[in-house]
């Protein structure tokens, strides 16, 4: 057989293959096909079966790593060169809800305090937090919304004080602290891999922080008939401007849900507060004053993060 007899068949096969479109999935599978249409959600394509029939299919853009589509010309014109392109960033979900839970510490809480503090008060530096956020995504990279943060810590302790030259009494003290933060924020999202499974999320927020510090001390009141427990209650409240920065590394379990680990830093300095004291006979006094030394409420959060998109 003439060795040149197979040349037309070979050239036909090459031309046919070259004219085909190609889709490469995020799983690195290659599909030779004819791409019919592309939109912001999926690619529609056709596959030619062995018997010559055609099967129509589609693939979500979130599953596409890249595609090659030949430029189609009118009849009697030369075929155009294949155009290699990557799909645009897929904008699938407009809303992003985030929830993070974990521990917190305020390393500089008592830096400006001039008094020696007991170990029970120092326990207020460490506590538990819950952070939540809701953002409307303008695209896959960033969105605007709001963030809320709740922090709680408490302490308790007993101390002995001399009631008379021969008698000592025990004073018990309990302190509870509640801090709330609320403010508008911007969320930035970076995809770290081609399969869009790993993301780095960063947030920036400015808002207001509110503190409520409750303290109760109980001691025995001794008289001729014996003694009764007496309580003194104090309440400190205040608010100040604050700023919040957050970062988290997350893994997408599916297109809507991701989990990961994150951290936040909240900056705040309280310079003015309201102080209320309530005595055992139910009389109370309230004062609003500038603090001699600003209370540093800045804190660091470390969290488990859950995020839902829809």
Image: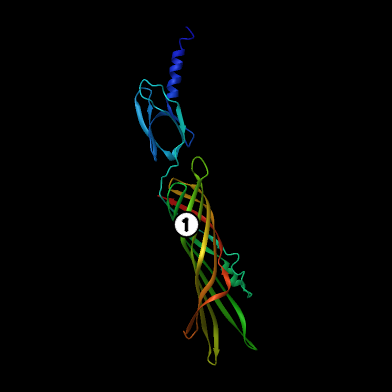
Q: Image quadrant of residue 171?
A: bottom right
Q: Which residue lies under the disc numbered 1?
A: 185
- As drawn, which residue projects farthest toward the bottom? 224
Q: Report the front residue among 217 and 180.
A: 180
Residue 165 is situated, as x and y percent measured from the top left of the image, at 65, 89
Residue 135 is situated, as x and y percent measured from the top left of the image, at 43, 54
Please indicate whether residue 242 sits to the left or right of residue 94 in the image.
right
Look at the image and tell me whether residue 229 can be seen: yes
Residue 277 is situated, as x and y percent measured from the top left of the image, at 50, 80
Residue 88 is situated, as x and y percent measured from the top left of the image, at 44, 39
The number of callouts visible is 1
Residue drawn at 57 percent across, 70 percent down:
295
Q: Report the front residue among 183 and 193.
A: 183
| Element type where label 1 sits in the image | strand
Q: Judge whether 85 appears above or below 219 on screen.
A: above
Q: Judge whether 80 appears above or below 240 on screen.
A: above
Q: Report the front residue among 113 and 138.
A: 138
Residue drawn at 46 percent across, 52 percent down:
307
- As drawn, which residue projects farthest toward the left? 53
Q: Residues within 10 Å of mark 1 (few under 14, many from 20)?
A: many
Q: Judge whether 48 appears above or below 185 on screen.
A: above
Look at the image and tell me whether residue 24 can be seen: no
Coloring scheme used? rainbow
Residue drawn at 38 percent across, 21 percent down:
77
């Amino acid at each position: 057989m003439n060795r040149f007899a197979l040349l037309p068949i070979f050239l036909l096969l090459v031309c046919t293959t070259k004219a085909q479109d190609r889709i490469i999935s995020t799983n690195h599978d290659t599909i030779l096909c004819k791409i019919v249409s592309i939109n912001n959600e999926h690619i529609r394509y056709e596959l030619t079966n062995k018997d010559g029939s055609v099967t129509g299919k589609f693939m979500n853009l979130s599953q596409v790593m890249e595609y090659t589509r030949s430029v189609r010309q009118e009849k009697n014109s030369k075929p155009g060169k294949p155009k290699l392109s990557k799909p645009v960033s897929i904008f699938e979900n407009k809303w992003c809800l985030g929830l993070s839970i974990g521990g917190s510490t305020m390393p500089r809480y008592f830096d400006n305090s001039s008094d020696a503090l007991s170990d029970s008060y120092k326990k207020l530096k460490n506590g538990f937090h819950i952070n939540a956020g809701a953002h409307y995504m303008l695209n896959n990279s960033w969105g605007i919304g709001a963030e809320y943060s709740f922090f709680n810590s408490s302490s308790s302790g007993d101390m002995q004080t001399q009631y008379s030259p021969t008698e000592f009494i025990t004073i018990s003290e309990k302190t509870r602290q509640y801090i709330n933060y609320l403010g508008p924020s911007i969320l930035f999202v970076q995809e770290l891999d081609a399969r869009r499974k790993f993301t780095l999320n960063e947030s920036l927020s400015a808002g207001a922080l509110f503190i409520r510090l409750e303290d109760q001390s109980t001691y025995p009141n001794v008289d001729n008939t014996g003694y009764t427990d007496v309580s003194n209650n104090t309440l400190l409240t205040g608010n100040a401007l604050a700023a919040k920065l957050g970062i988290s590394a997350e893994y997408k379990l599916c297109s809507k849900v991701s989990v990961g680990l994150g951290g936040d830093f909240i900056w705040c300095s309280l310079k003015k507060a309201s102080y209320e004291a309530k005595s055992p006979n139910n009389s109370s006094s309230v004062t609003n004053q500038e603090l001699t030394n600003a209370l540093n409420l800045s804190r660091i959060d470390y969290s488990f993060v859950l995020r839902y998109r829809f």
